[in-house]
Image (tube, rainbow, N blue to C red):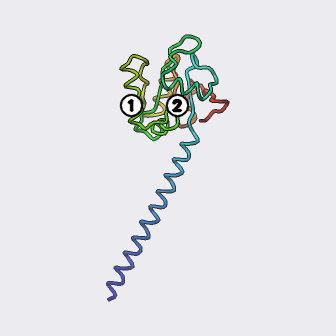
Amino acid sequence: MKRITSIQNLRRRFVFFIQVLLCIVFIFSSINARSQNEMLTVISNDKGAPPELKLSDLKSIFLGEKQRWHNGNKISIALMKTSTPAGAYICQKIYDMSSDELKKFWLALVFEGKADAPEFFNTTSELESFVAENPGAIGIIDQPPASADTRIVLIDGKKML
């Protein structure tokens, strides 16, 4: 009888531990999702993008509708891979599409010859390096830029989307 009671106590403790663990995971995942919502930053190469854009102009650029900057430089779009949390969030926020829909969208534009495909990156530092090294490049990252070789493009007067 004593053994059954101790097994029941162990089972209750285990269930309680699992519940606490699930609560902690839920809290951290919601904090992470909330921080992503607040931290999209548009960066560009010094040669090309203006220091400020309207959100509608930014979307036009990232939809491949605008191909060149006012100074004549070709626009090069840099995005995080859609398999990354930042890339998936950018799909929703900028494109209002799922990751798969975004891939199909760009495949169609490239196949039709309407636009060049964006460059996709695994890490923010790779994306920042690409933008810094390519005149006309513009990208979106989920944190303030670490590189002094890029500049933040204000969107509707704000540093963050």
Q: Position of residue 116 (x, y in %)?
A: 42, 19
Q: Dividing the image into 4 quarters, which one contains the N terminus?
A: bottom left
Q: Secondary structure at mark 1?
A: helix
Rendered residue at 62%/27% (across/down) = 54
Q: Secondary structure at mark 2?
A: strand
Rendered residue at 43%/68% (across/down) = 17
Q: Amino acid at mark 2?
A: Ile
Sequence-wise, the earlier of marks 1 and 2 is 1
Q: Position of residue 9 (x, y in %)?
A: 39, 79
Task: Say the numbered circle drawn on residue 140.
Answer: 2
User: Viewed as shown, does residue 35 lie left or right of 114?
Assistant: right
Give the residue pinned by disc 1: 103
| Disc 1 packing (10 Å; few <14; some 14–19; many ≥20) | some
Q: Position of residue 144 (x, y in %)?
A: 58, 35
Q: Is residue 67 above or below residue 21?
A: above
Observer-side mark, 1 or 2, equals: 1
Residue 37, image quadrant: top right
Rendered residue at 49%/25% (across/down) = 63
Q: Nearer the viewer, residue 12 or 161?
A: 161
Q: Amino acid at mark 1?
A: Lys
Residue 120, image quadrant: top left
Q: Nearer the viewer, residue 84 or 68?
A: 68
Q: Dividing the image into 4 quarters, which one contains the C terminus?
A: top right
